[in-house]
Image: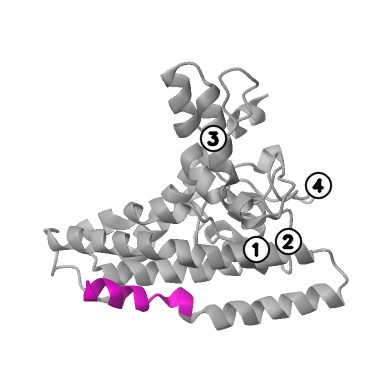
Amino acid sequence: MNDVLAVMQDDWVMMALPFFFGALAIELLWAYQANTKHYERVDFWTSMRVMLLTVFVDLIPKFLGISLMFAAYSISPLKGIVDTSLHWWVLLFFLDDLTYYTFHRGNHEVRLLWAGHVSHHNSQYYNLGTALRQGVGERVLKYPFWVPLALLGFHPAMIVTMLSVSLIYQYWLHTEAFYKFPKPIEFIFNTPSHHRVHHGSNVRYLDRNHGATLIIWDRLFGTFSEEVSEEPVRYGLTKNIDTHNVVAVSFGEYAAMWRDFRRAKTWRDKLSYVFRAPGWSHDGPDLRSDTLRSA
């Protein structure tokens, strides 16, 4: 238990909070001076309340997840072979980034996971405050995705550190202060432009650009979309919510999924509402993103 608690306390994300709020203050000042509409007061404070809720919800799943990592690490045949040498850190960086891509893509393609992730997307504003509006329910199912890295011999402290570095990097992606960077950077790395696409409700942008630090996985696996000036990104959901109630913002999609589950007549359809992509319906139009794009 002491090892788990020690790793939890070494989470770099909590240490980065002063940076997060400092950058947020700078962006707020920029938005005010430029007289832009990047922030809306009620929406911003909703994001802050969701952030606080996420911190508390995350505690037990994180403890259990790291405990699972230690259990996996204890039986790894590579335990003791993988150490903290630079080449292992480099390998872990790529494995962590691929793991995040898999997890994040799953959050958009499996409705049960989407229900936990949607609070990060249901704001119609795109700013550093939105970056702190994390998926609340996704914390419950997040950490098992990283357990295989412990089976590969990576110490849980290394895994949590790399997770933290990845999340810290992703924070600055949630801004409209930058448009695009030089092409080599845009080709390899996730950038604000790529992540704006990810938050778009336009059909061409739906469920695209799931990468964390790198955008190469989206290019390799066919989930990449370029931000194009002729189609500005519309933020939010395809059907936006009309509430700022924190419980509804954070957990409303679970209720919607449960209603669909109950009205389905067969177990196949019931389970499809849980495990198929958002937008699937047994008795209505198919509004899944790939279906909409192919129409």
SS at mark 4 in the image = loop
**Residue 11 point in image, percent of width and height:** 40, 75
**Residue 32 point in image, percent of width and height:** 84, 75
Q: Quadrant of the C terminus?
A: top right
Using residue 32 as the reference point, say whether residue 28 is left or right of it: left
Mark 3 and mark 4: Cα distance apart in space:
35 Å
Q: Is residue 12 above or below residue 60?
A: below
Res. 181 in view: no
Q: Residues within 10 Å of mark 3 (few under 14, many from 20)?
A: some
Q: Residue at x 80, y 72 (%)?
A: 31
Mark 3 and mark 2: Cα distance apart in space:
24 Å
**Residue 274 point in image, percent of width and height:** 47, 33
Residue range highlighted in magenta: 1-14
Q: Please name the amino acid that badge 3 sits on.
A: Met
Mark 2 and mark 1: Cα distance apart in space:
6 Å
Given contact means CB atoms under 8 Å apart, are the residues at marks 2 and 1 in contact? yes
Q: Residues within 10 Å of mark 2 (few under 14, many from 20)?
A: some
Res. 60 in view: yes
Q: Residues within 10 Å of mark 1 (few under 14, many from 20)?
A: many
Given contact means CB atoms under 8 Å apart, are the residues at marks 4 and 1 in contact? no
Using residue 61 as the reference point, say whether residue 263 is left or right of it: right
Residue, disc 2: 43
Residue, disc 4: 230
SS at mark 1 in the image = helix
Q: Please name the amino acid that badge 2 sits on.
A: Asp
Q: Residue at x 43, y 77 (%)?
A: 12
Give whichever of discs 2 and 4 has the lower sequence position.
2
